[in-house]
Image: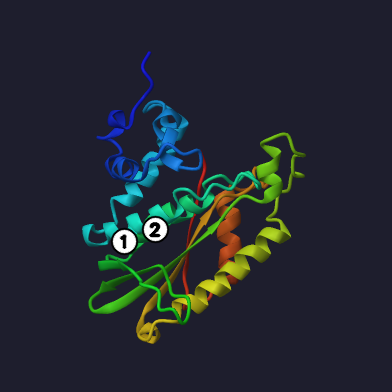
Amino acid sequence: MALPSMHDFRDPLPRLTELHDRFVADETNNFFRRFPRRLRDENSVTFRFYKRIEDWLSFIPKSQWVIFQGKVGAAVSLLDLKHKRYWEKLHDVFNEALGAKILRQNFRCQDIVFVPPTGKSEVPDLRGTKESRPHYLEVKTINHSLDERLSWYGGKDPVHTTELPLTLIQKIKSSYAKAITQLTAPVDSANAVKIVLFVLNPDHNVDPIEEELDQLFMDFFSSIENPEFPIHFCILTL
């Protein structure tokens, strides 16, 4: 039986195929080197995971696609073996595409662009416009803890909890504060809608009994949300 190739996924995953074709290299640290094998077929869990990312990528305007490709190219070989995080930084880049979808679908924005760095201060990831009003959006990815990652490879399982761990709470609060600083950096931010998107990879030991996981996060985000910086979130699961 022939091994799958990216040609097999060209129709369902057109933008990921384009990224593959541009950046694939026969190097161990290259994310796309064995990407088709990991996808396997359209019934696999891995394929379904990347089909969702493909949906996000479809919301990146054609005018911004080259810019996004540059972001992917900068992270495609950032393989973190030491901490078992592999291509986590690349997936953080993929998550920025969800920000474009939120601006388009939730806020009906036009003219969605990636905000160029200023060299002076950190800026938000994306900018859109609705009825001449700017909308800025910053994407913050909260990845698994190191304990969680190590537990997949023979390490000790984290202790079960029905509540959000203090370390996770602190990480989210810190990320939210940083996002607010970034969202207020643009010169026209005073009159802008300023949005924070959290993409969450929660540890498997966080498992509430009397409510769903998304409700647990919803309650927490409601308790820390500043109305001037509304929070949207997405929980990633395989």
Mark 2 burial class by Cα count in 10 Å: few <14, some 14-19, many 20+: some
Q: Secondary structure at mark 1?
A: helix
Residue farthest to the top, as pictured: 1
**Can you say whether 189 is above or below 61 in the image?**
below
Who's the residue at 35% across and 85% down the image? 188
- Residue 122 on image: x %, y %: 47, 75
Question: Which residue is under mark 2?
Answer: 71
Using residue 181 as the reference point, say whether residue 42 is left or right of it.
left
Query: Looking at the picture, which amino acid does disc 2 mark?
Result: Lys
Q: How is the image coloured?
A: rainbow
In this rendered view, identify the residue nearer to me: 48 or 86: 86
Q: Quadrant of residue 155?
A: top right
Q: Secondary structure at mark 2?
A: helix
Who's the residue at 64% across and 47% down the image? 203
**Disc number for residue 67:** 1
Disc 2, disc 1: CB below 8 Å?
Answer: yes
In this rendered view, identify the residue nearer to me: 115 or 79: 79
**Can you say whether 119 is above or below 166 in the image?**
below
Query: Looking at the picture, which amino acid does disc 1 mark?
Result: Ile
In this rendered view, identify the residue nearer to me: 199 or 217: 199
- Residue 31 on image: x %, y %: 45, 42
Q: Quadrant of residue 106?
A: bottom left
